[in-house]
Amino acid sequence: MSEKGEGKGKRTRKKLVKITLIVIVVVVAAAGIWYYSIPTESDILVLDKSVLTVVMDEIPASSEGAISAAQDRITNATGVPKRSFERYFRLMNASSTQFLWHLVYNVTGGNPDLTVFLVKRILPEEGFRISDEHVVGMVGSDYFNAHFKQKSFDSNSNIAYYTYNHRSHNPGDIELTMWVRLGNDRSVTGQHVVTTPQEITVSVEQAIDIGRENGLNEPLSGKPVLADGKICWRVVWQHTPTEQDYDNQTVYGMDVHCTTGEVIGKHRYKRPTPPPIQLAQVTSLIEKLGLEGIEDGAIIQVCVMNSADEKFSVVKTFGRVVVKEGTIKNADISLWLDRELIVNALESDDVVSYLQNHATSRNVIVELHKNMVLLQKKGYMSLYEKLKKE
């Protein structure tokens, strides 16, 4: 073989070696990217809401615009970066009406489907127009104009507030706040208004006499209220209830119709029971404790003792702390907290200090569901250091 042929063969072999090395590097890099893209325990996604609503001055005209707006809202709410969006969320359906877009996403990790509403904002002029028409349809325009005055419209809750006035020398002036709530589709979803034209012919003194005649004890007082769409005088016994009152469920008040004088409702003493701990209270407690040192993927089960068997889940997910009602699988630890301890801690000036000074083995129980090494790796030691009493 000539020297020229040998040189060409060497160059060909070197070229093949380079190509082989490049292929190996690409394959290894791709494998590394694939490996590190596999969701680990720290990639856990837990949603605290199954519905997200975005109120907009104008909703998108196209599905592409709606999908983009929905994705922005989801990434802001969950902390999932846009580059990883499709790993966790898959669009199942997108539809629209004149006033909103309705998008539904399937979510990984055992989460329920996520619904996103892009809603056209209801401005006060439109809101009052709809609610005015609704009230006029029940009481008539003459009665409406005589007694209703627009007060304010809340564009966040879509509630139109009215001041209701009934002026007369006998039985006297009455002023009440009434309201109509609208849905995003502009339908009426709730109301607290008089539902028929009603004149006030019974005075508060007459209502008190009616209450007395029906067995209420002195001393008595009365005030105007709206009950089931009817204006009434609520006549109440000015009395501090006793244990016997609770046992007997003694009648302490009556609603007397302002037109007919009919007793349309009675009120009895019922023994007060402590309300269950609410999600908002646990969320506030966790926020004030601060879980900055806890790593993503950490899961804490919070159980309330001496209450109504409430259970909550606290999860660190994509940098956010999510608090949900109910239990969740694979918790790291369970915290059993006494109801009174939670309430008193939230009412204190410093939640952490209060827990440091008042937590005992009777009102706080901790169950560990993972080994100490893993718990320390997830940052639970920082929580312990914060709460331990010096």
Image (cartoon, rainbow, N blue to C red):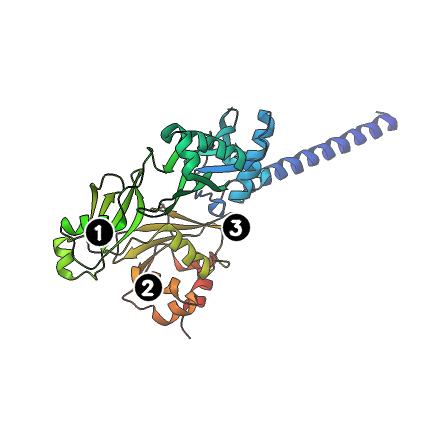
Q: Which one is nearer the viewer's eye here, 80 or 190? A: 190
Which mark, by number, is residue 319? Answer: 3
Q: Say few, some or many: other residues with alpha carbon within 10 Å of mark 2 (under 14 / 14 to 19 / 20 or more).
A: some
Q: Eyeballing the image, is 94 above or below 261?
A: above
* Left or right position of 6 against 206: right
Residues at marks 3 and 2, CA–CA distance in whole angstroms: 28 Å
Q: Secondary structure at mark 3?
A: loop
Task: Identify which residue is drawn at 46% across, 44% down.
Answer: 44
As helix, strand or loop, the secondary structure at mark 1 comes to: helix
Viewer-nearest residue: 169 or 41: 169
Where is mark 1, residue-wise? 208
Q: Nearer the viewer, mark 3 or mark 2?
A: 2
| Crowd band around label 1 with a 10 angstrom C-alpha radius: few (<14), some (14–19), many (20+) | many
**Residue with the most extreme bottom position:** 390
Instruction: Report the side of 107 relative to 263 (left or right).
Output: right
In this rendering, the answer to whether 335 lies above or below 121 is below
Front residue (pair 295, 301): 301
Q: How far apart in space, not on screen, are marks 1 and 3 (Cα)?
A: 60 Å
The tag earlier along the polypeptide, 3 or 2, is 3
Residue 160 drawn at (x, y percent): 46, 39
Q: Is residue 121 visible?
A: no
Q: Who comes first in sequence, dot 1 or dot 3? A: 1
Q: Where is mark 2, residue-wise?
A: 341
Q: Position of residue 274 (x, y in %)?
A: 26, 56
